[in-house]
């Protein structure tokens, strides 16, 4: 099976998941809140008024019909009005997505980048102090609530040491760079505004650390155990017998295999990262989508909640799709076996 | 062995029991040899005892509820107030102790629900196979496709903020992990001979599944549940940090951190100590789970 066939198969695989996700979100939005008509009209309303509004809102239709209507609207970008901001939920989310994207992608990138050398060192020194140290650090890393780590970082680096900004994406008085991608790090470089780039980077530093520590720990432990599995294989023995330098064996041949099998969990870790971004954005007053979602929940702004859930669900499915693509690319066996 | 006549020289029943005891002893030694898991066990025992005895050992048990003690507001940690006091003068140490009750209870209940649903569905899907398997596992995939924090948030948003709704919401988003874990395990053992012999003896699928297969998937479930006790505490703390859990003045750890967050520039201890308590609890469960994983020799991730 060619790589393209593999891609298509994988893409088709995510269709039922996205479909099911939309059914689930629809059910949460329509069934759980009780009777929206009664809520809207209050207890004084007559039977006729209730029936009239029910028909107007399409709620007298059977559920599958309601779902079809709803899905049709969602696909067209009609995600309903936000009760809090009075804007279309879709445009609200589009305006806030880049900030969340910048935070989560930068976090994931650095978490994986740093996890690689730590995981390799721990895996190649199994049961020595490096391994024990990495194990304990990792257990601490996944045990601390990320929103609390965020607060502790603020107390230490902002309040006590005064080294970094407390919150936000840019300092007061620093104008956002000309919008191209809406990612400040990228846009400021495109515009050649290095001052703005530095300012954006310093604002990003603490949220990234708070959000990424646990992800780093998860991925590091995984690379470690995959490295240990690799070590027992014949090709490693052969390479050592040939007298190849250790660094070459470990970082080129073994890491390539170990990293490939660790990849699947990176997609999963990204899901937890997205969920936690909600909490970390609150702590750092980060103007992202997650914060919008949390405020929507506190204000019972239901269209906005559904919108955010859809976007995060799609983001998570997409991330896992990308992981599958890389997996199939790095390990030809995966795509060949599927045929 | 159901036979009552034991052979004089070779008592099979007690031989089997001895072997079982030997296995348990070996497992215990492996567990005890892992210092981290012993530390974890000690941590969780401390926590459970502290939670049970909270009304008796808390220096100011009345501070667990609402209350205003302005003469001692926002005091830093001292001998009287080990973790300081919050902005209304309540003893944080006392509130943290009562918070331990809520966290452990919440996590235990959530996992009981999630495991009952997930294990049952996983067993049925794995054993029956075919269309049943496809339908159950597709639904499971969908639930796995939403981060648990987020799905729980959506459900709580729809049902209203309370401790009960938080528990239902987390269980609702958590069962799918167990369904997938158990289904995978069942697939790997269902062709084994002891299953076939059970079927040959005339057992129906319910009996075969619950009497023969279930005992064989207990190990991975135990390890995962131990680790999850901690993770559910984390998710629950996150939700109560957002104000979606038990409402004030209930002393949940997450809500206490949320209160302290407004005073990071002046009174650091209000947010720091409840967070330490969360980390302590989660770390304890992780240490135990890590050790159990070695003893039972299972992979759950």
Image (spheres, coloured by chain):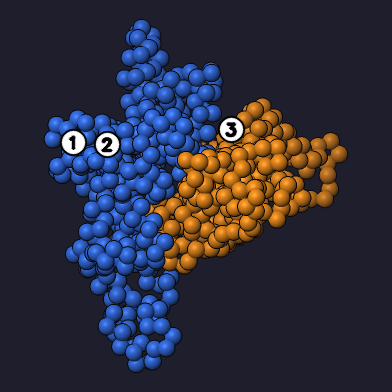
Chain colours: A blue, B orange
Gap in angstroms between the C-alphas marked 2 and 1: 9 Å
- Residue B240 in picture, x, y percent from top left: 51, 54
The verdict on a common chain for dots 2 and 3 is no
Q: Secondary structure at mark 3?
A: helix
Which residue is at 39% across, 66% downward? Answer: A300
- Residue A335: name its quadrant: top left
| Label 1 Cα neighbours within 10 Å, binned few <14 / some 14-19 / many ≥20 | many
Structural distance between the alpha carbons of marks 2 and 3: 44 Å
Q: CA distance from mark 1 to mark 3?
A: 49 Å
Residue at far front of view: B71
Front label number (1 vs 3): 1
Q: Residue at x 18, y 36 (%)?
A: A188
The answer to whether the residue labelled 2 contacts the one labelled 1, judged by CB atoms less than 8 Å apart, is yes
Q: Disc 1 marks which residue?
A: A188
**Is residue B110 shown left or right of residue A75?**
right
Displayed quadrant of residue A69: bottom left
**Crowding at mark 2 (Cα within 10 Å: few <14, some 14-19, many 20+):** many
Q: Is residue B150 left or right of residue B38?
A: left
Residue A47 percent location from the top left of the image:
38, 92
Taking the image as drawn, is residue A195 in sight?
yes
Given residues B84 and A216, the one toward you in this image is B84
> What residue sits 31% from the left and 68% below the top?
A83
Query: Is residue B193 placed above or below B202 in the rendered structure?
Result: above
Label 3 near label 1: C-beta < 8 Å? no
Asked whether A192 or B80 is in front, the reply is B80
Chain that bears disc 2: A
* Residue A200: image tag: 2
Q: Chain of mark 1?
A: A
For label 3, the crowd category at 10 Å Cα-Cα, with few meaning under 14, some 14 to 19 and many 20 or more, is some
Q: Which residue is mark 3?
A: B294
């Amino acid at each position: 099976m060619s790589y393209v066939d593999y891609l298509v198969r994988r893409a088709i695989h995510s269709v039922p998941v996205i479909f099911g996700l939309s059914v689930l979100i629809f059910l949460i939005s329509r069934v759980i809140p009780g009777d929206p008509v009664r809520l809207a009209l209050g207890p004084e309303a007559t039977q006729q008024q209730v029936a009239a509004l029910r028909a107007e809102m399409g709620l007298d239709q059977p559920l599958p019909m309601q779902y079809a209507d709803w899905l049709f609207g969602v696909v067209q970008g009609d995600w309903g009005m936000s009760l809090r901001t009075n804007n279309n939920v879709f445009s609200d989310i589009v305006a806030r997505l880049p900030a969340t994207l910048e935070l989560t992608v930068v976090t994931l990138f650095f978490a994986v980048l740093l996890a690689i050398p730590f995981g390799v060192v721990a895996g190649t020194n199994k049961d020595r102090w490096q391994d024990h140290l990495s194990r304990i650090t990792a257990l601490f890393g996944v045990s601390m609530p990320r929103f609390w780590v965020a607060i502790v970082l603020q107390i230490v680096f902002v309040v006590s040491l005064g080294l970094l900004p407390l919150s936000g994406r840019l300092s007061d008085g620093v104008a956002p760079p000309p919008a191209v991608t809406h990612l400040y790090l990228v846009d400021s470089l495109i515009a050649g505004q290095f001052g703005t780039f530095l300012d954006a980077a310093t604002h990003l530093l603490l949220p990234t650390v708070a959000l990424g520590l646990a992800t780093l720990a998860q991925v590091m432990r995984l690379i470690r155990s995959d490295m240990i599995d690799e070590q027992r294989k014949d090709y490693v023995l052969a390479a050592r017998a040939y007298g190849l330098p250790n660094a070459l064996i470990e970082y080129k041949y073994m890491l390539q295999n170990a990293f490939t099998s660790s990849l699947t969990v990176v997609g999963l870790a990204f899901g937890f990262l997205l969920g936690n971004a909600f909490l970390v954005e609150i702590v750092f007053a980060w103007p992202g989508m997650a914060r919008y979602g949390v405020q929507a929940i506190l204000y019972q702004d239901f269209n906005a909640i559904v919108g955010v859930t859809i976007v995060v669900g799609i983001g998570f499915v997409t991330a896992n799709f990308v992981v599958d693509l890389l997996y199939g690319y790095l390990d030809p066996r995966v795509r060949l076996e599927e045929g | 062995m159901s036979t009552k006549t034991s052979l004089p020289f070779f008592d099979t029943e007690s031989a089997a029991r001895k072997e079982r005891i030997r296995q348990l002893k070996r497992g215990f030694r492996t567990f005890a040899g892992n210092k981290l898991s012993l530390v974890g066990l000690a941590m969780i025992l401390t926590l459970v005892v502290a939670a049970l005895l909270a009304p008796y050992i808390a220096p100011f048990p009345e501070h667990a509820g609402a209350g205003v003690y302005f003469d001692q507001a926002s005091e830093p940690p001292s001998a009287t107030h080990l973790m300081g006091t919050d902005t209304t003068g309540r003893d944080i140490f006392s509130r943290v102790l009562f918070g331990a009750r809520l966290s452990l209870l919440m996590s235990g209940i959530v996992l009981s629900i999630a495991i009952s649903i997930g294990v049952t569905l996983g067993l049925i899907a794995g054993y029956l196979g075919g269309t049943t398997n496809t339908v159950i596992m597709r639904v499971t995939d969908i639930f796995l496709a939403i981060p648990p924090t987020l799905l729980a948030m959506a459900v709580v948003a729809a049902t209203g903020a309370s401790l009960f709704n938080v528990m239902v919401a987390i269980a609702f988003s958590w069962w799918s992990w167990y369904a997938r874990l158990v289904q995978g395990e069942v697939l790997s053992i269902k062709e084994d001979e002891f299953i076939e012999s059970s079927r040959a003896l005339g057992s129906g699928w319910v009996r075969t599944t619950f009497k023969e297969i279930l005992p064989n998937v207990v190990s991975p479930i135990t390890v995962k549940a131990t680790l999850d006790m901690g993770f559910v505490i984390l998710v629950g703390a996150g939700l109560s940090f957002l104000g979606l859990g038990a409402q004030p003045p209930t002393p949940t750890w997450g809500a206490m951190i949320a209160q302290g967050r407004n005073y990071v520039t002046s009174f650091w201890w209000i947010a720091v100590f409840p967070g330490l308590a969360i980390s302590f609890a989660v770390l304890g469960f992780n240490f135990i789970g890590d050790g159990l994983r070695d003893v039972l020799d299972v992979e759950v991730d």
